[in-house]
Amino acid sequence: MQNFDLMRNVTIGQYIPTGSPIHRLDPRTKILAATFLILGISFNASIVANTLFLLLVLVITYLSRVPVRYMLRGFILGLPVLVLIFVMQLFFQGWTEPAGKVYFQWGILRATRYSFQLMAISLFRVISFIFLTSLITMTATTTELTHGVESILKPLRRIGLPSHELALILMISLRFVPTLAEEMERIMKAQASRGADISRQGFWRPDKAARMILPLIVPLFMSAFRRAEDLVLAMEARCYVGGEGRTKYVELHARPVDYVVVIVSFLFMLLLIFYPWPSVRAIMAALGLPDVL
């Protein structure tokens, strides 16, 4: 049954209390800082900048005291799809630069220096995005994140947007990720006990993966609808009427370190977007190293 242990591979939505400096930051600080960093690297196509950004994310992960091996579990479920995307990018993006250095070519498949660079940038971005989004939920509880998002969206109430309801919807959706993974695991074990051919190795074959996933979709959706209905009934039983007039037991208070983190993250975003980052070849030439790429 270890092949169906999905919960250990779902990192988004899991809170891990370690008492680190990242945990002690205001949830609004973590949300804003992660947003600035993700926006900055999304508009940067430099392999050098993406490499440095990944190193920065690893340093933040180290400060959070969350094991890197645990963070890497978030890639396992989507690894077949990611490998397919990276391989296609490697062998089909080479034609976008006909004059580039060619490493491999066979028929329509063409791997060049440019396609290798694009694949590396995509890989670094995916790792950075998953680490950052996972760190937000691993270092803050669902209640803290709900209050943080609501506080950030509060200015939008002046134009009629319900900030509390939007924050609640976002956090419920986030909290449903491990819940649905647990339900999927239960359904897979139930079908395997009845003789269904379900194994983790099958996910590497698209035809077999499709045959395995299709029988799981209907029961998973039915279970999700039942859980959503239970949540609605529970909220109605507690007389939930929205965020109007609601008070909080714990108020959020930003410290000087929170302002520093937000400002530094914003400046780093501007640096990623507007700074003319040099290429690897330019750095190697400046250091007097031969161009072996």
Image (cartoon, grey):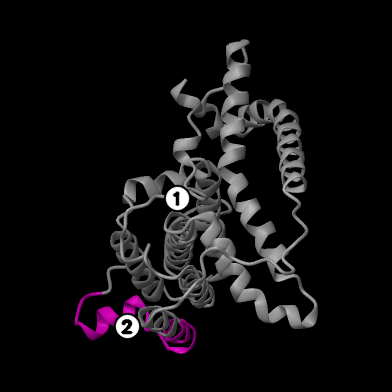
The secondary element bearing badge 2 is classed as helix
**Residue 88 appearing in the image:** yes
Q: Residue at x 66, y 77 (%)?
A: 154
Element type at mark 1: loop
Residue 56 position within the rendered picture, expressed as x and y whole percent measured from the top left: 34, 69
Instruction: Give the label, 2 or 1, closer to the camera.
Output: 1
Corner quadrant of residue 224: top right
- The residue drawn where x is 53% and y is 44% is 78
- Would you say 20 lies left or right of 113 here? left
Would you name the residue on which mark 2 appears? 282
Residue 283 sits in which quadrant?
bottom left
Q: Residues within 10 Å of mark 2 (few under 14, many from 20)?
A: few
Q: Amino acid at mark 1?
A: Tyr
The segment highlighted magenta reads: 266-290
Disc 1 packing (10 Å; few <14; some 14–19; many ≥20): some
Instruction: State the residue lying farthest toward the left.
Output: 288
Q: Relative to residue 220, is residue 40 depicted above or below?
A: below
On the image, numbered disc 1 is attached to which residue? 15
User: Is residue 5 toward the left or the right of residue 62 in the image?
Assistant: right
- Looking at the picture, which amino acid does disc 2 mark? Ala
Task: Give the percent coordinates (x, y) of residue 235.
Answer: 73, 48
Residue found 47% across the figure and 86% down from its top: 270
Vertical position of residue 202 compared to residue 263: above or below: above
Q: Tell which circle, 2 or 1, labels the residue nearer the N-terminal end.
A: 1
Left or right? Give the position of 168 relative to 18: right
Image quadrant for the C terminus? bottom left
